Image (cartoon, grey):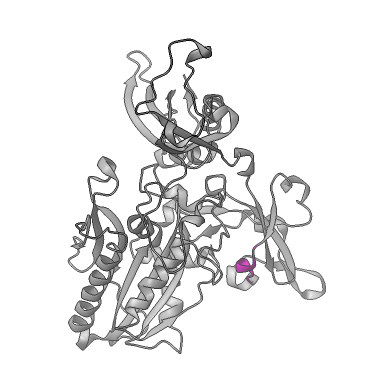
């Protein structure tokens, strides 16, 4: 009933009738038998933000002297151009990033670099391929459209200028064709066919950094910015998060000394950050561990945490350390690259159990974070209801089935309200040999009121979308 009215449960506290002057328990409809007030509780409901505000936005980019636009991917609604790392931001992601950098700055000379646009030209994707990174297969692809000619079809959302996306046609390496007066121009339809990606990792910027003439060996070069990847719907796996990349170059003769120093200090700093919100006398509930990869050179950074209950029984991977990449231009130098997921780190430090809360537009979220002070996060949405729907469908043997795309469509249609997708069963028809799959979807929000009717509508739309996009036949 509360959700139907747009309300969420924000607080529960004991009710004391003595604290309310003149209070008298009259019972149901003033009958003689009064209610028991011993152990009574007050439930405080507050109004939540409406779902109608979560519409895809339209972004404009400037290429030379012309404007182009692209719609925000449905699976990333509310995730682009949020500015959490900007100078004026008080977001916990920026706070944890600044603390991390400040501590490393006590040991290594730092050089902070401005992170370029998250738009990724197709030519730069070869960097991830050559490093055996599987990020590219999960990258979001977008099509650029002529800003003026398509403005009418893109008016369903709010239009924003994306200042960080101001790039030149040469930077994006898009095809051109001869124009008037012998000049080259880019046709709209060619732009629409060009593959432009949202970067899935900051590692794509490494060649530009280490090949720059002002690259300083022995200094820690730092890039911080948002990245975007298609992913399965899991409690601690997110399609958009903020990453910090540390790049350290040094003489190959000093390889062991530099690497060990960086690992030791990084582990000490991360352990220290995870104790910031501990109460006096409490024991550390999270521990950092660097785990060797099969190649014997790289590491993943694991955190074993007990802050989030049974869902976090296994280790969380908050980053990676890469040492196996051969030098691209400096033959006598070695490089270490450290990638850290700032969103997961912020969740661990403040005890934020749902990554979606970091992206909320509700102003109550930021009120939890006072500059210069770190205290455990207190959620303003308690015990949100969950709704379960099953879906089964026949597969098209010729088309195949992409489970990652299945999760991505569910994320887009549900506006990130699906928190779990569980595979239930596989059935093969004994006569036709056609295969059917069955999945269970669980819907739940972390900051908004969600009704059973809204979920039923999303589930209905989801059935239609997977039929069109994944070429399956819902049963």
Foreground of the two, 45 or 208: 45
x, y (%) of residue 467?
52, 29
Q: Which residue corresponds to the image point at 47% horizontal and 44% vertical from the top-left?
A: 380
x, y (%) of residue 351?
34, 52
Q: Which residue corresponds to the image point at 63% horizontal and 65% vertical from the top-left?
A: 175
Left or right of residue 229, residue 306 in this image:
left
x, y (%) of residue 238?
42, 50
Q: Which residue corresponds to the image point at 24% horizontal and 66% vertical from the top-left?
A: 271
Please determine whether, in this image, residue 21 is positioned above or below residue 364. above
Quarter occupied by residue 384: top left
As for residue 166 lying within the magenta part, the answer is yes
For the record, the magenta segment spans 162-167
Foreground of the two, 192 or 147: 147
Q: Residue furthest top?
A: 32
Q: Is residue 277 visible?
A: yes
Q: Which residue corresponds to the image point at 45% horizontal and 37% vertical from the top-left?
A: 19
């Amino acid at each position: 009933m509360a959700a139907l009215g747009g309300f969420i449960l924000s607080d529960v506290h004991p009710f004391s009738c003595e604290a309310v002057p003149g209070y008298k328990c009259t019972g149901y409809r003033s009958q003689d038998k009064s209610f028991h007030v011993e152990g009574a509780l007050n439930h405080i409901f507050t109004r939540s933000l409406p779902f109608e505000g979560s519409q895809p936005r339209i972004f404009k980019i400037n290429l030379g002297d012309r404007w182009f636009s692209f719609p925000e991917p449905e699976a990333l609604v509310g995730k682009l151009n949020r500015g959490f790392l900007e100078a004026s931001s008080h977001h916990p992601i920026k706070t944890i990033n600044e603390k991390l950098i400040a501590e490393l700055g006590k040991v290594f000379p730092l050089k902070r670099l401005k992170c370029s646009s998250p738009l990724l030209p197709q030519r730069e994707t070869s960097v991830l391929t050559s490093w055996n990174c599987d990020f590219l297969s999960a990258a979001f692809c977008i099509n650029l459209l002529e800003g003026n000619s398509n403005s009418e079809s893109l008016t369903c959302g709010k239009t924003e200028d994306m200042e960080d996306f101001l790039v030149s046609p040469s930077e994006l390496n898009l095809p051109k064709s001869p124009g008037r007066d012998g000049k080259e121009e880019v046709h709209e339809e060619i732009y629409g066919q060009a593959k432009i990606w949202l970067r899935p990792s900051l590692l794509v910027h490494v060649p530009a950094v280490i090949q720059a003439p002002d690259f300083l060996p022995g200094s820690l070069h730092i890039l911080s910015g948002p990245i975007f990847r298609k992913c399965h719907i899991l409690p601690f796996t997110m399609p958009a998060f903020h990453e910090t990349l540390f790049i350290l170059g040094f003489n190959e003769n000093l390889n062991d000394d530099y690497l060990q120093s960086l690992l030791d200090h990084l582990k000490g700093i991360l352990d220290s950050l995870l104790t910031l919100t501990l109460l006096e006398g409490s024991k550390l509930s999270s521990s950092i561990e660097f785990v060797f990869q099969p190649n014997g050179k790289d590491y993943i950074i694991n955190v074993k945490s007990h802050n989030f209950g049974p869902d976090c029984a296994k280790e969380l991977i908050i980053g990676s350390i890469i040492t196996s990449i051969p030098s691209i231009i400096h033959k006598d130098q070695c490089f270490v690259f450290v990638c850290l997921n700032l969103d997961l780190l912020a969740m661990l430090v403040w005890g934020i159990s749902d990554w979606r809360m970091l992206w909320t537009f509700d102003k109550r979220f930021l009120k939890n974070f006072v500059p210069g002070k770190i205290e455990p996060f207190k959620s303003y949405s308690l015990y949100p209801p969950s709704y379960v729907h099953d879906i089964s469908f026949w597969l098209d043997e010729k088309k195949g089935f992409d489970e990652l795309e299945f999760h991505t469509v569910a994320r887009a249609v549900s506006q990130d309200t699906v928190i779990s997708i569980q595979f239930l069963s596989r059935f093969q028809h004994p006569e036709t040999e056609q295969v059917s799959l069955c999945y269970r979807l669980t819907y739940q929000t972390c900051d908004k009121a969600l009704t059973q009717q809204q979920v039923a509508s999303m589930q209905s739309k989801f059935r239609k979308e997977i039929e069109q996009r994944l070429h399956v036949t819902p049963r």
